[in-house]
Amino acid sequence: MKPSRGYYCIIQYCPDLARLEAANIGVLLFCPERDFLQARMSGDNARIRHFFSEAPHDWIQINAFKNGLIDRLDVEREEIRTLEALETFIGRRANQIQISPPRPMKVTDPSRDLDQLYADLVGGRARHSKGQSLSGFLRKKFVGAGLDRKIRENIRVTVPVSQREIELPFGFQNGRFNLIQVARFEAEAPERAKDTACRYAVEGQSLYENPDPTLGPLQLILVGRFRSVAESRPGVERILEAHKVRLYASTEVDRLVDEIRRTARALPESEPV
């Protein structure tokens, strides 16, 4: 696979910002071309104890700061599409958990590259996530419904309007090849959820209007998490529908499962699931 340009940051615990002494406790990898933004955080506080053994520590607060950073990254990842946006996110950190400026690197396999960065710069046991991801929830639903032979995973397509290659977790064929993407519309202000919807709308319409050489006609389906479905969903759905993008809330996955069961074509026996 051809390497892509990416950026990595070191996540550090800095008990006294004036002294600039820090312990590495995690890493972050951003690869815009692969639509990849993830962090690996230490699963314990051994490095903090090693570097700052003499100082008293509020471990409950430290763990809350670590969890809070992962939560904010998860909520805001759809807003972070450029290096400048990542730098803005980093600049807002104001507690003892700091993120170093992004440094360029070549990215071949983002997940493996992130694991290697963690091993090289932090070491020890990494905390990959604190709960089941929305993609993991969907996979469990699809497998539980017996849809293995109707669902493809890890589909790569190029968005014509931006010439950006993206990877989508799931897809199925029912006359159009439906690309399933998870999305987060959990911003506190409904207007920010609409901003996120607009970005998906532009890409979704471009995919709809330009058949893929291998997959044929396409359609984007979003499975979205909302902070408030009642407040945010109507505006988001209006934007998406006007641009040929379909939407299911994460609470409506059973409806999507039923649609796939009724309409999706089985994959050829020779094609991997």
Image (spheres, rainbow, N blue to C red):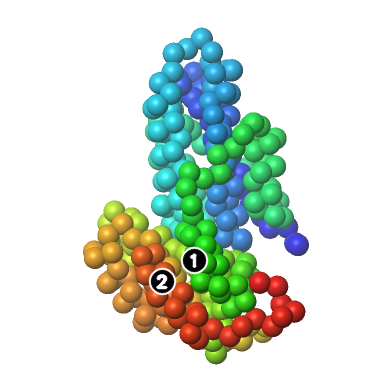
Q: Position of residue 148 (x, y in %)?
A: 60, 72
Tell me: residue 89, above or below residue 229.
above
**Residue 176 showing in the rendered view:** no
Quarter occupied by residue 32:
bottom right
Q: Position of residue 76 (x, y in %)?
A: 42, 52
**Residue 97 showing in the rendered view:** yes
**Residue plotted at (68% across, 48% down):** 113
Q: Position of residue 239 (x, y in %)?
A: 34, 75
- Tell me which numbered mark, 2 or 1, is placed earlier along the sequence: 1
Kindly report the distance in space between the C-alpha atoms of the residues bearing marks 2 and 1. Answer: 8 Å
Question: Circle 1: is it few (<14), some (14-19), or many (20+) Cα within 10 Å?
Answer: some
> As rendered, which of 151 and 243 lies closer to the eye?
151
What amino acid is at disc 1? Lys
In the figure, is residue 215 to the left or right of 260? right
What amino acid is at disc 2? Asp
Q: Disc 2 marks which residue?
A: 254
Quarter of the image where the C terminus is located? bottom right
Quarter of the image where the N terminus is located? bottom right
Residue that protrudes farthest toward the left in the picture = 231
Q: Secondary structure at mark 2?
A: helix
Q: Secondary structure at mark 1?
A: helix
Tell me: residue 33, above or below residue 216.
above
Residue that protrudes farthest toward the bottom in the picture = 175
In the figure, is residue 243 to the left or right of 109? left
Tell me, yes or no, whether the two marked residues, 2 and 1, touch with CB atoms within 8 Å: yes
> As rendered, which of 87 and 213 lies closer to the eye?
213
**Residue plotted at (50% across, 27% down):** 13
**Residue plotted at (39% across, 64% down):** 250
Question: Circle 2: is it few (<14), some (14-19), or many (20+) Cα within 10 Å?
Answer: some
In the figure, is residue 152 to the left or right of 12? right
Q: Disc 1 marks which residue?
A: 141
